[in-house]
Amino acid sequence: MKVSVLGATGYAGAELLRILYNHPQAEVVHVTSESHTGEKIADLYPHLRGLYDMVLESMKDIEAIGKDSDFVFIGLPHGHAMKVGRALRDLPVRIIDLGADYRFRDTSVYEAWYHVPHTDPEAERVYGLAELYRDEIRDAKIIGNAGCFTTASILALAPLARAHLIDVNTIIVDAKSGVSGAGRSPKQANHFPELYDNFRAYNVAHHRHTPEIEQAITDLSGEATVINFTPHLVPMSRGILATCYATLKEGVTPELVDAAFEKAYSKEFFIRLLGRGGYPSTKEVRGSNFCDIAWHIDERTHRVIVLSAIDNLVKGAAGQAVQNFNIACGFDEKTGLDFVPMYP
Ligand SMILES: NC(=O)C1=CN([C@@H]2O[C@H](COP(=O)(O)OP(=O)(O)OC[C@H]3O[C@@H](n4cnc5c(N)ncnc54)[C@H](OP(=O)(O)O)[C@@H]3O)[C@@H](O)[C@H]2O)C=CC1
Ligand SMILES: CC(=O)N[C@@H](CCC(=O)OP(=O)(O)O)C(=O)O
């Protein structure tokens, strides 16, 4: 399969190149940048030296890129993918967008949270969270890859929402991310003296991943869902740990909770269940496409607390995109992705 990576100079794009290098069925044919066209990708990302000799192109002739490619992966800030989607609408090329443009079924939700008009609302698209939307992903023209915090949170809560074991309107997600989640462009808050040895929340009660989690939990439970989601920035480069709380419905026992997780995920290679009482950690999934999940039950409050760890750049972005690519191509889902986490 010939694939192109738009936004190859971003962290998500560069991570795609790392993964695609070892993918036996993918050949990268175009890589793009806005501000580094004409430069070599390996000069900007020296860890790719000797592996990619490609020169970065602009997206001016996006149709030519689309014509050369079977798949286009998009690692651009939100607002750009929908223009690419429109431009490539009539070509046979398929699109996997790592950003948010194609994640929402109802584009008015996107417009309300991202504060830009959606310019491709009619596009046929599916939500790209492989374990939950596999059947839709198989034949999709456009896959809106799930977000990073959302992947960790939705995978943690899905079995309980689907089995109607929790009151979905009591959900609280308290999540922590490494700073690569904010992309490569420098920002004051991510400057070493301000980030290091520091820990803080941000975008409380208005983070854009809130409606994305609500959309999936509403789908799975069949009940309109409103949640609380609080992200935090942690002074580490990669990783997300989501701690998800919800009140159990009356009569729900710990054994029913255990059974729901087993039923949902016992056959999923990329989801590793640590069981009731386990403690996933970001280091144990670092550099891999795994999502490690454990759950605890507080008998006093009758609440379940689910812990979920991913690498934001892999299962939260590039790895998930390649998993979706594998599904869309009919390849084994693990192709190019079954590598062991880096430890320590
Ligand atoms: N980082 C993460 O953990 C995750 C990121 N994502 C999503 O992936 C996408 C990329 O994120 P990330 O890699 O972190 O972001 P970066 O800021 O690191 O990279 C952005 C990329 O987009 C390019 N770009 C920026 N503006 C334009 C423009 N006007 N025209 C063309 N290209 C442009 C940049 O090119 P250049 O700088 O060379 O000009 C760069 O290649 C975003 O939508 C993000 O939400 C999703 C899940 C996780
Ligand atoms: C640490 C950090 O800043 N994280 C980003 C995560 C969002 C992201 O990367 O975008 P997706 O919606 O495509 O997942 C944030 O909170 O905005």
Image: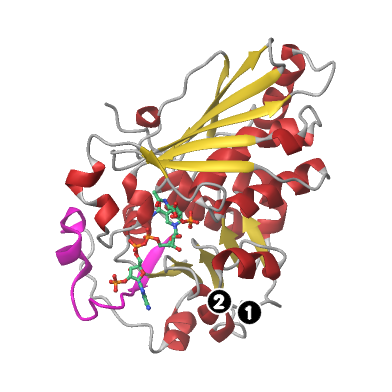
Q: Is residue 311 visible?
A: no
Count numbered badges in the picture: 2
Please tell me which residue lies in front, 108 or 19: 108
Residue 323 makes an appearance in the image: yes
Q: At label 1, which amino acid type do we have? A: Asp
- 244 lies left or right of 321: right
| Residue that mark 2 sits on | 82
Spatial distance from mark 1 to mark 2, Cα to Cα?
A: 6 Å
Looking at the image, residue 318 lies above or below residue 13:
above
Q: Are marks 1 and 2 in contact (CB under 8 Å)?
A: yes
Give the residue type that dot 2 points to. Answer: Met
The quarter of the image holding the C terminus is top left
Identify the element where label 1 is drawn.
loop
The verdict on residue 285 being magenta is: no
Q: Please report the residue visible at 64 percent of the width from the left and 13 percent of the height from the top.
A: 298
Task: Using the image as rendered, state which of residue 214 and residue 201 is in the foreground.
Answer: 201
Tell me the magenta residue range. Answer: 26-50
